[in-house]
Amino acid sequence: MAQHQIDRLDKKILQLISQDARIPFLEVARECNVSGAAIHQRIQKLRNTGIIKGSEFVVDTYKVGFQTCAYIGITLSDIKMFNAVVEELKKVPEVVECHYATGKYSMFVKIYAKDNRHLLQIILEHLTLIPGIAHTETFQISLDEIFRRQLSVFEIESTIDVIDEEE
Amino acid sequence: MAQHQIDRLDKKILQLISQDARIPFLEVARECNVSGAAIHQRIQKLRNTGIIKGSEFVVDTYKVGFQTCAYIGITLSDIKMFNAVVEELKKVPEVVECHYATGKYSMFVKIYAKDNRHLLQIILEHLTLIPGIAHTETFQISLDEIFRRQLSVFEIESTIDVIDEEE
DNA sequence: ATTGAAACCCACTTTAA
DNA sequence: TTAAAGTGGGTTTCAAT
């Protein structure tokens, strides 16, 4: 566990690259009035500390045929089954997020499906059959998402505890 | 509305670039045994049709000080307030996703907060004060997410209806 | 719709401060 | 921690198929 300072430059970099992963680092450098090497090193450090987890192209799931999305609260019959349930959930490709929850449900997952029939099929033929899952409640989301964005860097604390993953 | 064919090459490209937005297109080209120009044009087309929405670096929200995440189901007092409520939600930076829902709730949002106190503060001092929001129910997610991934391209249909956005 | 070549631009490393 | 310079490689365009 190490203390890591995130300064104004880091925030500016994060803001620029979190909106467009393909932006040339030299363009970031110009916007920040520093050298390309400086940006390169900052980004390397943000990667090493794990603050940057990776980068991805965002595919429009709606346009590729997945018109239905649902969040599902899962109640486990036995919390000791947690890890085993996670492994089974990973095998269901339509499950794209999996969270540990406190409160009413033990877990919370996000699922994409082509339509309602497909969603029901995934729940009945896959989720409810997983040993350890006692009960599910489905919160269905229809149509395209209204908006989605990354957390603004301006909300980020300046001093951050990180587990240092530098080699 | 146009019909758009997504073939094996498109899927392979999407698979590679959706995991790592910084992968050199020439490397994608080598993996696919086609020229760099072909990859360039395919990706351009996927962008124009809106199948690719963009690219982003993924920031570890937990590491930057947001240890709490919650999904919140929102009941509206009047569905006609929907758009106005969306505009107000956009002004709350901790709200990172907003969905239209069917069933128990009218809307479903995702929120990041620093801790429980912060979460409660956002709900009480921002969300419940928005005109049109009648009731909220919070499903709290704690700790880091267990897993998160993009929808596998292998689940994608081959024939896709898209609204063509080419200029 | 795909290619190869050309021109331009960028990423990354090393150097030095 | 930063900046400057060099090289190898990537991006992008274009004519041609």
Image: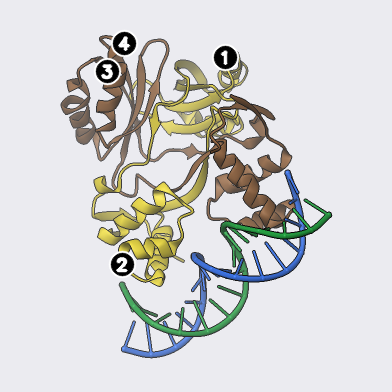
Chain colours: A yellow, B brown, C blue, D green
Q: Secondary structure at mark 2?
A: loop
Q: CA distance from mark 3 to mark 1?
A: 26 Å
- Asked if badges 1 and 2 are on one and the same chain, I answer yes
Please tell me whether mark 4 or mark 2 is closer to you in this view. Answer: 2
Q: Secondary structure at mark 1?
A: helix
Residue at position x 22%, y 24% from top?
B127
Q: Earlier in the sequence, mark 4 or mark 3?
A: 4
Q: Crowding at label 3, few (<14), some or many (≥20) Cα neighbours within 10 Å?
A: some
Q: Position of residue A61 (x, y in %)?
A: 54, 30
Q: Crowding at label 1, few (<14), some or many (≥20) Cα neighbours within 10 Å?
A: some
Give the residue type that dot 2 points to: Asn
Q: Crowding at label 2, few (<14), some or many (≥20) Cα neighbours within 10 Å?
A: few
Q: CA distance from mark 3 to mark 2?
A: 45 Å
Question: Left of B106 or right of it: where is B38?
Answer: right
Question: Left of D3 or right of it: where is B165?
Answer: right
Q: CA distance from mark 4 to mark 3?
A: 15 Å
- Asked if badges 3 and 2 are on one and the same chain, I answer no
Residue at position x 57%, y 25% from top?
A66
